[in-house]
Amino acid sequence: MRLSIKRYLPKGLFQRSLLIIVLPVALMQGAVTWAFFEQHWRTTTARLSENIAGDVALIVKMHQRADGEGFDQIADIAFTTLGLSVEFRKDDALPTTRRTAFFRVLDRTLRRALSSKLNEAFWFDTTRYPNYVDIRVEAEGGVLRFIAARDQVFATTGHIFVIWLSGATLILLTVAILFIRNQVKPIRHLAEAAEAFGRGQDMERFKPAGAREVRQAASAFLDMRARLKRHMEQRTQLLAGVSHDLRTPLTRLRLQLALMPDSPEREAARRDIAEMEAALEEYLAFARGQAGEEPEAVDLTALCETLGDDAARQGVDLRLDLEEGLSVHAREGALKRALANLVQNAAAHAGDVALSARREGSRIEVIIDDDGPGIEPGQREEAFRPFSRLDPARNANRTGVGLGLAIARDTVRAHGGELRLETSPLGGLRARVSLPA
């Protein structure tokens, strides 16, 4: 199985853009740092350490040849010509403890240089004094102690290079973060505007911004939004006009039937007119969608209780199991119609109907269960298609024109949710509505 690097890469545009800038800079600075420390700093430090080791060895030889006499003159020569402070500690011994520097390469370099120049035992400390190095060499009758300036032993410019490099990197990252954030912000606003429009909301203050390509995409989105809004308005006006034009002759027919004597034919005609009026209302509701209503905070618990009261007035025994304090940001009328469609659909094909609502993490689940014949899993997606009646599956949609589930899912999706059909524990159909809390 091949290991894919994609799973380890950042998913967001901001993080990916930052990575595109940071990764090459990090590689470049890593190479520069390695070249500096490996080719310059270490080489310079090694040469300085070898020089100081040679000076120490020279003073040790001079002390041995002088046989302990004229040490003050040797110390004076070491200080004036070599910059070394030399002290002879009579009857002293080398320390037995050693403190290691943070950069161990310094100790290793100095130890290697002293070992190559001296035959005598030695000890040194690079940590006790900030600006000096303490070197001690075993001599006859005591110990020679050397105090050398740190810049005589090591290249002390390495930390300056690191500070400048780190400062430049910090400035570069700050500029990159600010620049990339400003470039990503218009894209994020475009995504938020598209998501809001998909939920039926309108971000009037949104306007194109950012780079040329982002502005083109934002302008194309605004044009598309305008065309879709015109299309929805035209659809609503068209069906509203058709509904109005058809209601007038239907009203005349209803009046004529009211003047006719009672007969089986009269009752059949009245039922046909009632079905036609119901179909017109359903067409108009499907065409109207979310028009004319602004989203607001909706008490979902109270809304479901209202559905229970409405169902009771229609002779439906709707069992409720509701969690208190549920709230969603929605168009109350549209959401109520969608849930009412699901309840009426269940009541039309079952005797036992239950509605429950509870919070599940960041979502709110509204579930309508019934004990009816249900819908086969393979036909559930077909049930959401407009004008689909699914006669064999639900013992025929005896009323309506097959728009109830289509309107319900369209409304739920417009609120950022989802509607799914499942098998109910009661034996029939379960409609699960998931909405953002």
Image (cartoon, rainbow, N blue to C red):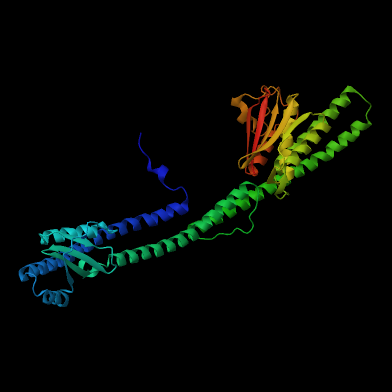
**Residue, x 36% and y 63% (percent of image)?**
166
- Front residue of this view, candidates 418 and 275: 418
- Front residue of this view, candidates 65 and 45: 65
Can residue 154 be seen in this snapshot?
Answer: no
**Residue, x 66% and y 29% (percent of image)?**
430
Can residue 298 be seen in this snapshot?
Answer: yes
**Residue, x 34% and y 66% (percent of image)?**
164
Residue 303 falls left or right of residue 217 = right
- Front residue of this view, candidates 248 and 190: 190
- Compared with 409, 376 (above or below) is above
Residue 135: quadrant of the picture: bottom left
Residue 42: quadrant of the picture: bottom left
Residue 1 falls left or right of residue 15 = left
- Compared with 46, 238 (above or below) is above
Residue 350 falls left or right of residue 13 = right
Residue 350 falls left or right of residue 93 = right
Residue 112: quadrant of the picture: bottom left
Q: Where is residue 192 shown, x and y percent of the image?
A: 58, 52
- Front residue of this view, candidates 140 and 10: 140
The quadrant the C terminus occupies is: top right
The quadrant the N terminus occupies is: top left
Q: Where is residue 332 shown, x and y percent of the image?
A: 73, 45
Q: Where is residue 374 shown, x and y percent of the image?
A: 67, 24
Q: Please state the total of marks drawn on the protein image.
A: 0
Q: Where is residue 178 shown, x and y percent of the image?
A: 47, 62
Q: Which residue is farthest front?
A: 91
